[in-house]
Amino acid sequence: MLRHIAAAVLAGALVAQPVQAQAPAGPPPSQTYIHAGALLDRPGQAPRGASTLVVQDGRIVQVADGLLPAPAGARLIDLSDQFVLPGLIDSHVHIFSDDDKTAARLEAMTRGAETRFVVGLDNARRTLDAGFTTVRDLGSEPTAITALRDGIEKGLIEGPTIVNAGRMISISGGHGDGANGLAEPYAELVRDHAVNTCDGPEDCRRAVRIQVSQGAQVIKFAATGGVLSNVAGGLGRQMFDDEMKAIVDTAHAFGRKVTAHAHGKDGIEAALRAGVDSIEHATFTDAETLALFRQTGAYLVPTMIAPEAAVAQARAGERPPAVLAKAEEAARIAFEGHIAQYAAPGVKIAFGTDTGVSAHGDNATEFKMMVDAGMTPDRAIRSATVDAADLLGLSASLGTLEVGKSADIVAVSASPLADVTELERVTFVMRRGVVHKLDGARQPWPAD
Ligand SMILES: [Zn+2]
């Protein structure tokens, strides 16, 4: 039977008619003309003046100077008094993290997967509404994040394109060990099901392979302690060289990029030497560390709004007591560190916020902090477009507005090159050619 089908398919292929002879004359392809008052089509270069973007089937098919009249049948979106730029990319979010930290802690043992998923759905919508058309999720329950990612990808639900890590790989007692601080019966239960903790290189290979098998597109591991884990383990290095190397090599063998959560200098440098593609947070760095960034070409993802938010939450009693001292130390040091990092030539920076620590939809407040630490608005925007797309391995479709690329487009009412906080007030959001926000208002869904 199978052989007959195969033979028929092969025969069909051999006698196929020329396409022109069979294709029926269908309706003209639907196009959208976007009139932009100014267009930053390639962040890092000077913006263009009044321009027209033509979008078809979710992609950009033309970029032209001036405001081209839209032909009959085409949709015209008038942003001729707006500043238009590529959709923003946040390289570090936790889309399922609840903004209400107290409720999340109190309900941790009683919330079902469905309740947590609904929180994630809402967060995804708010993220897109804020102009972030792509995010990299660096730590969520694997079945939830892959379901959300695929639902958005199929156009079933509203949200940004998601590149996901699954669970963060961690040593036992490390930043990503879910059993930290739990009473014994619960700790044992969590450990039994934990697939993201590993001790020793062999075990760390296994942990990477399990994350990949559960849908991880990128691997994240904790090289050092973390601010928010409920363990008084400090912010220094927690993982040995052989464990980091095993994680990086195993992930790269699967074609996955690897990013390391790292605060302490020793952990950052060990992760860079192990071959990671990026470092999250990078709180404690010096000239030696920055030289290693330059040498390896790894990206630095600063997440500036996270420590500030964590300190405020810990002081308000919304976080466990073990968190407060770590958060205060990190917040104090981080800002000065980032000033030096931005000033260091050749250190690659990708925009990331660790949103989920701070509130979803506030992602763009990171821009002002970057600029306050000495970055030009132009470079800050590039870090959230061109550079983040490079870090995510998506430069072929994202990061700039060029013919053939995805129609992920946002607009603001004045130039963010003059005032970067304009990006906190996005007026227009299109993702894959679908309008999600127009004139500052969310559009009905489904948008078509
Ligand atoms: Zn994070």
Image (tube, rainbow, N blue to C red):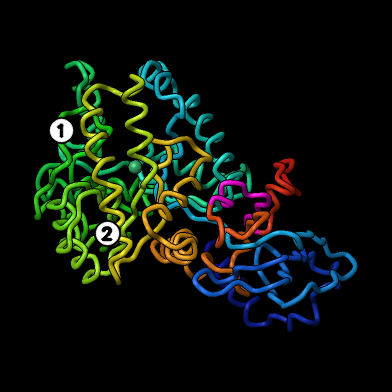
Find residue 85 and report its horizontal and vertical position in percent.
60, 62
Magenta segment: 421-432
Q: Does the magenta stretch include residue 306?
A: no
Q: Does the magenta stretch include residue 422?
A: yes
Residue 263, disc: none
Amino acid bearing label 2 = Ala
Seen from the viewer's position, the closer of residues 430 and 439 is: 439
Q: Is residue 416 left or right of residue 97?
A: right
Q: Residue at x 36, y 29 (%)?
A: 312
Q: In this view, does 363 lie to the left or right of 404?
A: left
Find residue 401 and report its horizontal and vertical position in percent.
60, 69
How many residues crowd mark 2 within 10 Å: few (<14), some (14–19), many (20+)? some
Seen from the viewer's position, the closer of residues 5 and 113 is: 113
Of helix, strand and loop, which one carries label 1? loop
Q: Which residue is drawn at 77% across and 66% down?
A: 33
Find residue 433 and report its horizontal and vertical position in percent.
68, 59
Residue 173, disc: 1
Q: Residue furthest right?
A: 72
Q: Are the two marked residues, 1 and 2, in contact with CB atoms closer than 8 angstroms?
A: no
Q: Which residue is drawn at 41% across and 52% down?
A: 372
Taking the image as drawn, is residue 276 in sight? yes
Tell me the residue that label 2 is attached to.
340
Of helix, strand and loop, which one carries label 2? helix
Q: Earlier in the sequence, mark 1 or mark 2?
A: 1
Q: Would you identify the image quadrant in which residue 340 lies?
A: bottom left
Amino acid bearing label 1 = Gly
